[in-house]
Amino acid sequence: MGALAARVTASVAMTVVVASALLAAGCDAWRSFVWPTSRGSPPDPDASPPAPPSPPIPVSEAPVRLAPVARVTTEDRWVDLLAQRISAAHQREQRLLVYLGSLAARKYLELSSDPPWLLGESIGGRRAGVLTSQGGSFDIPLDGWLSPALHPPVDEVPQLAMAITLRSLAPKQLVTVFWEERPLANLSLSGGWERRTFSLPADLVRVGENRLRVYLRSAVPYGEHRASVAIESIEVGPREVIVSGPPTRLAAYDVLPGTSGDLELRVAGGSSLVYHLELPRRARLAVDAVGAGRLEVWASTDADHRLGREPKRLLDRPLRATRNRHLVDLTGYAGVPARLEIRVHGNHARFRGLDLEARRTAPVDRRARSLRDVYVFAVEGARADLCTPGFVPRLGALERFFAESMVFDRAYALGSAAVPSHAGWMSSVVPPNHLTVRGTYVAGSQIMLAESLDRAGFRNVGISANADVNDSRGLTAGFGDFQHILRAPSQTSPASAVVERLVEQLAGHDGRKFGFVNLNDPQAPYVPPPSLLEGVIPPQDAPARHLTHMWVGRVRLGKHEPSLEEVTYVRRLYRGELQLVDRAFARLIAAIDSEPVDPAPIVVFLGVHGEEFLEHGGAGHGRTLFDESIHVPFAIRAPGLLAPGRVSTPVDLLDLTPTLADLLGLEAASTWQGESLVGVIDDPIPPPRLAVSHLGDGSRAAIVGRHKLILGPGRGRGAQQYRELNAAPRLDGGGDGVGLRIVRNALTWHLWEEHRWRRTRWGTGANLRPAFALDHGL
């Protein structure tokens, strides 16, 4: 499969004419393949030049009613770093200090929804973390002043070292300590607290995340668990610092009530708070602090860490007892993952404010919210690149619609299979909350979008081509009329019939209407009618159209390695199915626009999940969390509420239902975990957000900005796949430093409280609201 992927990539490089800009009506810039113009095989280099590109599809000249934006407001605060304090690494007296007596240490534990640790336990007069297993792992970031390149060996003696303060909970305990899965030592433990030190061989330490693992011989009963060891702290730093003894203080900070009612952070001298983040253009750090001593701000990047360059000092000012406000220019670090260190010298500093600022203007929200008709057009198997410039045949209706809508360029489905994804967006509750031993079933206590609209007096009609979107799974709650139109053996596509049925059911109704269409044409088998395949010649050994679902299955199982020509042909069949979707969507839009109403209806187009075509060796959907399976089209046309435009910040469909409720002036249900995207739409530089997609086996895909982490169901580093989206793989094996820590921190907090997370209160893991730390005693 790897060889085929390389050939596919090479073919794309030969056949794609890269557009210098997106068409105004385009969907997304994500490129992977180009649809062939006539044949299924690659073009002949000696053939005649291709025909000139088709002229742009005209966009309606009718005036578009925009959202009222006559007034604007200026906003400076971008991210409140005091609220992100639990994501900050703690350095004390030149060492990274992991204090397991605090719940904030969770960010260093191996990523899992249920790590085998009880943090903050009282053991022998100390606060520590208790390992409720015989083995446990940590991910330790080495960057900034602890970058391995700044500490080369001297006379073959390692210059980085580690200390672990621990206490056995079982008699005659033995522990093996591993660093990057190489044993460092086998130790016998006594029954009291011990501080053990270890040299870190230079060939083992790496820039960015390092895996520390401990394995214990035995465990004993501990409450409802079995436990093996208590660990108070882990220290990593220069050798001479580690062997000199433990730090004078373990806690990173104290949270104190402020004079104006807000909280303050008291950081002792000799301590640093280290943030990993990606900054917008013209960003600056605003520091409001009092104290005794000095305050420094240092910054560095992954390139600095790899090359052994010391962090750059951006601020060095004395602390005073009266208010000190400093502005630190961060322009030189915009657009790259950066490490920002706030260091305190002397006695202490009390931070009253610690904000990342990005000056921008946003429209004052003066929207006239009121009830109006709503239509949701959902397509299973629709990829985000369906309207990429250069792909033919063109999808004219969709292109026109996206030109008139607010388009979310980086929208992610909540899963790569239909039922979990539908359950998530309809209820604004993450798919794991719907998972039962029988599969995905929405509980009766959840409040679906259709139920909220039903209570507001809407007539709700749903027509689905997927029989699994049904009442037994709880997906039709709130619909007065829900029907299925399935693909018959003699029928190439149910798309037009589904739309026609919806139009018939809603015709003549004078009240408010909610129409839901769910199509699954762009899924195997890919059987567009022959009229849409004129000039397309199947390559030798190509699957029959009505058997392409079997082809997908054999490819997925590794029983068939298709040729490049086969893949190109199958993708052309898939494109034909999208043409049928486009025609059906055009019919729905024509029906909506033929009966003008005031206020104008809201129309949503969304992909429920995508499809893979050998980009990663597989085919179809529902088995992986690669972008081809979860990056979907998502657009909202809401005249008078949302101006046409584009949002580049990653979002997931958990927020769709709250957004529609917001635009209609309805109250959000208390069970909804998502939040309205109106604030993201209005903000020209939205703060970072965490988008998450799920698989039934427990896998998660987390996206923050350009950084994506796929966490598999197992344990160990092999269960994690990190990549920087739209970036070429690094030849030196780097690239998983600051970016990985950014998305890892965000996913840590999400996994901790996934089942009861409320974005309206806690934000997302990438930009926590103050309530999250306070609600958890941090």
Image (spheres, rainbow, N blue to C red):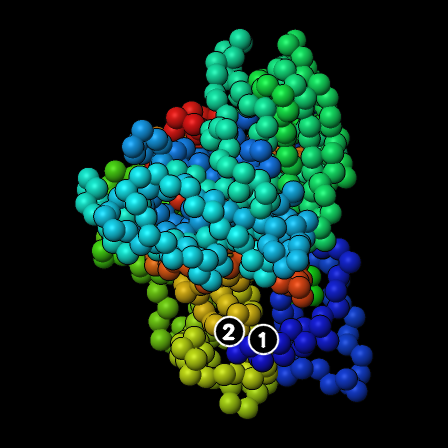
Residue at coordinates 56% horizontally, 35% vertically from top-left?
A: 91
Q: Which element carries disc 2, helix, strand or loop?
A: loop
* For marks 1 and 2 on the same chain, the one whose residue lies earlier in the sequence: 1
Q: Which element carries disc 1, helix, strand or loop?
A: helix
From where the camera sits, is residue 663 visible?
no
Residue at coordinates 73% horizontally, 58% vertically from top-left?
A: 56
Q: Is residue 688 left or right of residue 102?
A: right
Q: Could you say where residue 78 lies in the image, as x and y percent from the top left?
A: 63, 30
Instruction: Report the amino acid beneath label 2.
Output: Gly
Q: Could you say where residue 399 lies in the image, as x and y percent from the top left?
A: 63, 55
Closer to the camera in the image, 759 or 658: 759
Q: Is residue 591 left or right of residue 316?
A: left
Counting every numbered tag in the picture gives 2
Q: Quadrant of residue 270?
A: top right
Q: Is residue 674 above or below residue 521?
A: above
Closer to the camera in the image, 413 or 83: 83
Q: Could you say where residue 108 lies in the image, as x and y percent from the top left?
A: 46, 44
Closer to the camera in the image, 763 or 211: 211
Q: Is residue 513 above or below residue 9?
A: above
Assess whether mark 2 and mark 1 are in contact (beta carbons under 8 angstroms): yes
As drawn, the label of residue 5 is: 1
Instruction: Report the amino acid beneath label 1.
Output: Ala
Q: Is residue 727 left or right of residue 655?
A: right
Looking at the image, the residue that sits furthest to the bottom is: 540
Residue identifier under label 2: 617
